[in-house]
Image: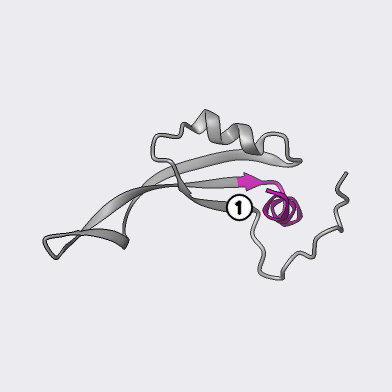
Amino acid sequence: MFTPDLFKVPENASNVVLVENLPVDATTREVAHIFRPYLGYKRIRMEVKQVVEGASSVAGILVPHRALVCYAEFETQEQATTVINTI
């Protein structure tokens, strides 16, 4: 079992965990199942972004690809820090 003081919380810590590079076809429900067991889980927000970095090149033209990102919100910075250090 994890105790609240197990992980050092940075001074600039946020209560939101950013998860990048999820499969574009992942559903909100699927991703939420990852975070629900953690203490303080509130909600997630998912967003599809166009990414140029690491884009493929077709005939010398960069072709951006889509990437799914998730923002998982927790009640406190300590809870978010615990998630970051245990997933």
Q: Residue at x 76, y 64 (%)?
A: 9
Q: Main secondary structure of the magenta part?
A: helix
- Three-letter amino acid code at disc 1? Val
Query: Which of the colour schemes (rainbow, by chain, secondary structure, one colour) is used?
Result: one colour
- Along the horizontal axis of the image, is 85 left or right of 18? right
Residue 36 locus on image (x, y percent): 67, 34
Q: Quadrant of the N terminus?
A: top right
Where is residue 49? Give x, y as percent: 35, 50
Left or right of 73 on screen, residue 86? right
In the rendered view, does 36 fall on the left or right side of 22?
A: right
- Residue closest to the far left: 59
Callout 1 secondary element:
strand
For residue 51, which quarter of the picture? bottom left
Identify the residue at image location x=64%, y=59%: 14
Q: Residue furthest bottom?
A: 11
Residue under numbered circle 1: 16
Q: Position of residue 74 (x, y in %)?
A: 67, 46
Q: How many marks?
A: 1
On the picture, is 27 further left or further right than 6?
A: left
In front of the other: 63 or 39 = 63
In the rendered image, the vertical position of residue 77 relative to residue 11, given as above or below? above
Residue 13: x %, y % from top left: 67, 64
The residue range painted magenta reads: 73-87
Residue displayed at 87% across by 58% down = 5
Callout 1 crowding tier (Cα within 10 Å): few <14, some 14–19, many ≥20:
many
Q: Quadrant of residue 8?
A: bottom right
